[in-house]
Structure formats: structure tokens, C-alpha cells
Amino acid sequence: MDERGSHVARLFREHNRMLVGLLVGRLKNEQEAKEVAQEAYVKLLQLDTARGAVSYLRAYLFRIAENLAVDRLRQRRSRSRVDRLGSLDDFCEEPRAERAAIAQQELQLLRDAVDELPDRCREAFRLHKLEDRSLEEVAARMGISERMVRKFITRALIYIRLRREGHSVAQARELLKS
């Protein structure tokens, strides 16, 4: 076994229980958490690292696992949406004008919610989500840290979700504070 393999084996012995526990909390499914952890170890073994990078393997393992868990959750949500649609025939039978009106209302609600955001929060959201700029670009353009950009975007997404769920402006702002 090479040096990296022995380091990964040690990581497995010392941290696998914690890693799987973290993933179970995220994915709410032990078997899926074990699969993601295993996939993370495989990716770590495939990593072409320099000798000095061995000290970062634990942090990298947890980052890989977190990214894989997020991917699984996204896949789950996508499958759930498709399942809710039912058959394509049912979807196509729904009157097009009605679908267009619903989409227009949803789009207007989104525009209104974005307009209601505080200026800096709205700017970070617009640059990152609507103009597809990287966190680094947004931070540089706004003269703030990437961490602050992430906070602004997270606050914006939570606020928009609350407004979509039917909360008033005042309720959404209050819930965002807590």
C-alpha cells in the first residue's frame, strides 16, 4: 500500500464513524450516507496529491463527502419533482394558458421578493444568481469578503422562499431575523 493509501486507511479508521454520522444527519438515510462516504474515500484515493498535501486529506475528505451529499439531495429533489408531475400526458393536457398564467404569477412574486431585499443583499443575489458571477467576482465587485457574499445570498434565498410560502413582507423579515 502506498503512503496515500495508508493515510486514507487511517482516516477511515479514525473518522469514518463521524463522517457517516454527519452524512446521515444531512441525508436522513444511513445506507445512502454509507454510500456517499465510500464514494468520498474513492475520490480521495484517486486524488493526485503532492506529499505535502497529505495533512489536508481529512479536510478534503469531509469536503468531498459534503459535496456528494449536496449532489444526492439535488438529485432527490429533481426526482421528487418529476414524480409529482405524474405522467407527461397529464402535464401536457393541462391548459397552456393556465400554466402560462401561473408561471407569470410565480415570476412576478419572485421579482417582487428580490425587489424587497435590502440593497446589498439584492446586489449580491443578482450578481451571483442572475448574472452567474462567481462568489469571488461578486466579493471583489462589492468590496466585501466571499463569506459576506454567501451570507447575503443565503439571506436572500431564505427570504424569497418565505415569500413564496405566503408570508407577508413583515413576517418574512421577522423570520429572517430569528
Image (cartoon, rainbow, N blue to C red):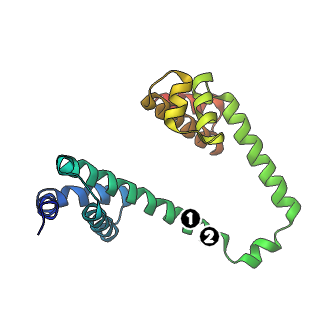
x, y (%) of residue 178? 45, 30
Seen at 44% across and 26% down, the residue is: 145
The N terminus is located in which quarter? bottom left
Identify the residue under disc 2. 82
The amino acid type of the residue labelled 2 equals Val
Spatial distance from mark 1 to mark 2, Cα to Cα?
6 Å
| Residue 168 appears in the figure | yes
Residue 170 in which image quadrant? top right
**In-image side of 54 versus 30 (left or right):** left
Image spot of residue 64 (x, y percent): 33, 55
Q: Residue at x 86, y 64 (%)?
A: 96
- Residue in the picture at 49% in, 65% down: 76
Kind of residue indicated by mark 1: Ser
Please say whether residue 175 is visible from this viewpoint: no
Residue 70 vertical position relative to residue 85 in the rendered view, above or below: above
User: Horizontally, is 97 left or right of 32 in the view?
Assistant: right
Where in the figure is residue 97, as x and y percent of width and height?
A: 88, 60
Q: Nearer the viewer, residue 57 or 63?
A: 57
Crowd tier of the residue under label 2, counting other residues whose Cα lies within 10 Å: few below 14, some 14–19, many 20 or above: few
| Label pair 1/2, CB-CB below 8 angstroms | yes
Residue pointed to by mark 1: 78
